[in-house]
Image (spheres, rainbow, N blue to C red):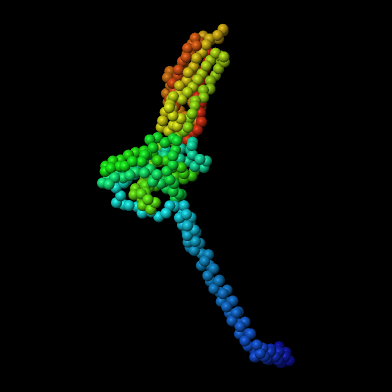
Amino acid sequence: MSTGQLIQSTAELETAVQLISGVQSSSHSGIRLTAILAAVFVIGIIVGISVYPLINSPSNLQSAATTTRAVQLQSVTSQPVALNVNSTCSIEILSVAFDQVDAPAGYSDYLLLVNASYTGNSGWDLDVSHFQLTTNELSVYNVTSVTAERNPLSDMTLENGQHVSGQVAFTVLNGQKPTKLQYYTDPSVIVAETDDIPETSSWISLVPAVIVNYDNPTTSNLTVMGIIANVTQYFYSNDVIGVTITISYLQISNNPSSIIVKSITELDPGFTISSMNPHVPIVIPGNNQQLTISLTILPPRFSYSGGIHVGLGITE
């Protein structure tokens, strides 16, 4: 740098310092306020940069999600209850049946065979409406009435050493499963509970009729009828459906003197013929006498609703 340029730069610097000094002397209060605001702004930025990673760290996000989840769970559970550990009442679930044939759309029925016992001195006034069922979604359901119930549990008083068994039913949302059964004396006191829920052992089907499909070589002279022999239309999967098929054949003109039932099959998936009487092949003479075939059919291991279909293979 030349001597002239250095002198010029020095002069400009002096001028600038004088201007700044002048401004400071005339506007000291304004500059001081501006400096304070700028400092606050800078401190805010520094704090924000420091805290942001902490707020958004995985541990904090997980805590926030856990808190939200806890609130959601609390919203579907019943109010806090106290379990009377010294209670003389006890309950156990002997079996579980599953039913979808009568449940509302989107729901399923669970029918629990419950044994209730009492070992106290004052008696247990058993009120079936005081049972409640908790599911794996922590939803709580009250007792309901289901058409397919057998031997429903009734209200009664149990004395010391007495017990009683019967079914209690609950309608729950599809996809949910029972996890706990409780009995309460009032909404805040549970006197008996069990979380020992057996696996579903029976499924309920609604079968109102039997439909017989058959080969018909003599259309106008062959009569086939089928009926359900049981007194109920509701069948558990460990039940037996009794079916009676009545066949009559009348020989006319050049028709064969007899026809033969060569096969009998159940046409619906899941159903099984366990026995038949008489066994095929069965000869049916053409003298219009009625022949009765008795079948026992096992229901499926799922809920089914509708008529069942039996197929007859008939030949001349």
Quadrant occupied by the N terminus: bottom right
Picture mark count: 0
Q: Can residue 175 be seen in this view?
A: no
Residue found 51% across the figure and 31% down from its top:
306
Relative height, residue 251 to residue 276 (above, below): above
Furthest residue toward right: 4
Residue found 53% across the figure and 71% down from its top:
50
Q: Which of 63 and 78 is in front in this view?
A: 78
Position in image of residue 290 (x %, y %): 47, 14
Q: Is residue 146 visible?
A: yes
Position in image of residue 266 (x %, y %): 49, 26
Position in image of residue 297 (x %, y %): 44, 27
Q: Nearer the viewer, residue 67 or 88?
A: 88
Relative height, residue 272 to residue 101 (above, below): above
Residue found 39% across the figure and 37% down from its top:
152
Relative height, residue 18 to residue 313 (above, below): below
Residue found 31% across the figure and 52% down from its top:
85
Location of residue 94 (image quadrant): top left
In this rendering, position of residue 113 left or right of residue 31 = left
Position in image of residue 240 (x %, y %): 42, 28
